[in-house]
Image (cartoon, rainbow, N blue to C red):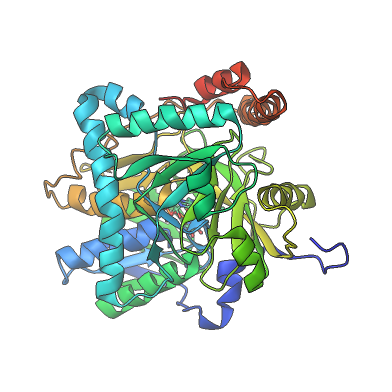
Amino acid sequence: MNALAAPPRNGELGFWVAGLADKRPSFPHFTGHDSVDVAIVGGGYTGLWAAYFAKKLEPSLSVAVFEAEQVGYGASGRNGGWLSAMPPGNRATFARAGGGLEASRALQQEFVAGVAAVLDILRAEGIDADQHKGGALVAAHTRAGLGRLVTRRDADLKYGLTDDEVHLLDRDEFQSQINISTVHGGLFYKHCARFHPAKLVYGLADTLTSMGVRIYEGSRVDSVGGKTLTLANGRVTAAKTFICTEGYSGQLLGSRTLIPVNSSMIVTKPLPEEAWQQIGWDGPQCLNDSAHTFIYAQRTSDGRIAMGGRGVPYRFGSGTGGDGATAQSTIDLISQKLRSFFPGIPFEVEHAWSGVLGVTRDWNGGVHWDPASGIGSSTGYAGHGVTSAYVGGRTLVELAFEQETERTTLPWVGYRARKWEPEPIRWLGVHAMYRLFGIADRWEERRDSRTTSLLARFGSRLAGLHE
Ligand SMILES: Cc1cc2nc3c(=O)[nH]c(=O)nc-3n(C[C@H](O)[C@H](O)[C@H](O)COP(=O)(O)OP(=O)(O)OC[C@H]3O[C@@H](n4cnc5c(N)ncnc54)[C@H](O)[C@@H]3O)c2cc1C
């Protein structure tokens, strides 16, 4: 970055939402008393997909979405814009949970199908979210990282991906797609599309409005009990309620069920054509790497690089970070990563922001439906939430309306991770895990090690991230 450049915009719900301020749909506050067939708490992708499939199933249903702030306020408006086939958790854990290998293969298959299904629906509904399916590249900067990718691909094949859907690239093959100077090789995943997160959320909200779904903003649900939702200025009776609050779920689902883990992003100003030629990233491939403290990136439709990574991983007491203001040290860290990928390219960061993922104790998500109370939830996607929100929102509707589909028997349906520890152990544990990962990355880089650091192995076991 140019030392004399103006500081980037910071927070403000991020580049995607801030950049569409004049196009943002706006919805009324809820006041009074009402009665609906389906009440949805949370106006992110999960809540919006659930509303969409409820209306598709039965157009006469009355469906209302209650959003505490504004539609897309959470991770759905702030994410990296990867629509990927990565399932929301550890396939091995899901297999061990009862259904065996076949159940996890079915989960993986549903997420492959989910990428195509989302793209099909966007096309059918006329939603333009800059979506473009160009696959995803995973770069290995160290020999240890490359070894992990070989193992990861073996697991991918075991869980049903084909050679065509995930393949290894040597250094030259990788650099012919994106010219990262330090790369040793990598993986290419076929099923991944880049998109503009806020355009997706607003496109879905507009579609829902035309389908007759009522959306309320500035309408926080304080509690859900029996068939009643209590809001600051009103009360709603609902036959069925879906809680779709992901990283913000502490209030309604319990602070030890899942925690808000922070992820931070920067976006550059548009790069000049010569820079793109040097970088060679001429397609819509998404990009990430095999470091323990990995990054994720996309080339935006208007020629910028948006890159995310870890900064402050977790705020004491499950803080959710407001509008996403990000520490300068985090901005520097991600900018430094970007410069190390593409040395000599002058980047200027235009905007930096953060958002929260919903993370369970073992990093596995779950869809839950309780017919007795008429309350369900779909949460815990960690960093793989875009396709999960589609699968989860759709599954919630199918469970609640007693539809038996290929989704309702997937192993994340009814899956419950154990509870998080109380504070301060929780804060210490998450910070320790990220410290271990950071140290492990530096150790592997310095030694050009072929094997993954024991510290990272320990951190992964601690977090349940290994397969
Ligand atoms: C920086 C970042 C990058 C990411 N990148 C990717 C990516 O590239 N690909 C990917 O697959 N996943 C990614 N994710 C994860 C993904 O964005 C999320 O998993 C997904 O958007 C979750 O959608 P959601 O609707 O479940 O939750 P959210 O989008 O978080 O929405 C929850 C909503 O509920 C509202 N709410 C909370 N409490 C209440 C209440 N009591 N009453 C009413 N409303 C309430 C909130 O205001 C919020 O709008 C990323 C996440 C972050 C933070």
Question: Residue placed at 69% from the left, 49% from the top?
Answer: 334
From what the image shows, is residue 142 above or below residue 43?
A: above
From what the image shows, is residue 274 above or below residue 426?
A: below
Which quadrant is the C terminus positioned in? top left
Q: Position of residue 261 (x, y in %)?
A: 57, 42
Q: Position of residue 180 (x, y in %)?
A: 61, 49
- The foreground one among 273 and 190 is 273
- The foreground one among 32 and 392 is 392
On the picture, is 59 further left or further right than 430? Answer: left
Question: Residue placed at 34% from the left, 73% from the top?
Answer: 214
Q: Which residue lies furthest to the right in this view?
A: 4
Q: Is residue 339 visible?
A: yes
Q: Is residue 375 visible?
A: no
On the picture, is 157 further left or further right than 289? Answer: left
Q: Where is residue 46 in the image (x, y as percent from the top left)?
A: 37, 56
From what the image shows, is residue 235 above or below residue 436?
A: below
- The foreground one among 249 and 136 is 136
Q: Which residue lies furthest to the bottom in this view?
A: 22
Total marks shown come to 0
From what the image shows, is residue 391 above or below residue 143?
A: below
On the picture, is 114 further left or further right than 436? Answer: left
Q: Where is residue 18 in the image (x, y as percent from the top left)?
A: 61, 72
Query: Picture quarter containing residue 209?
Result: bottom left
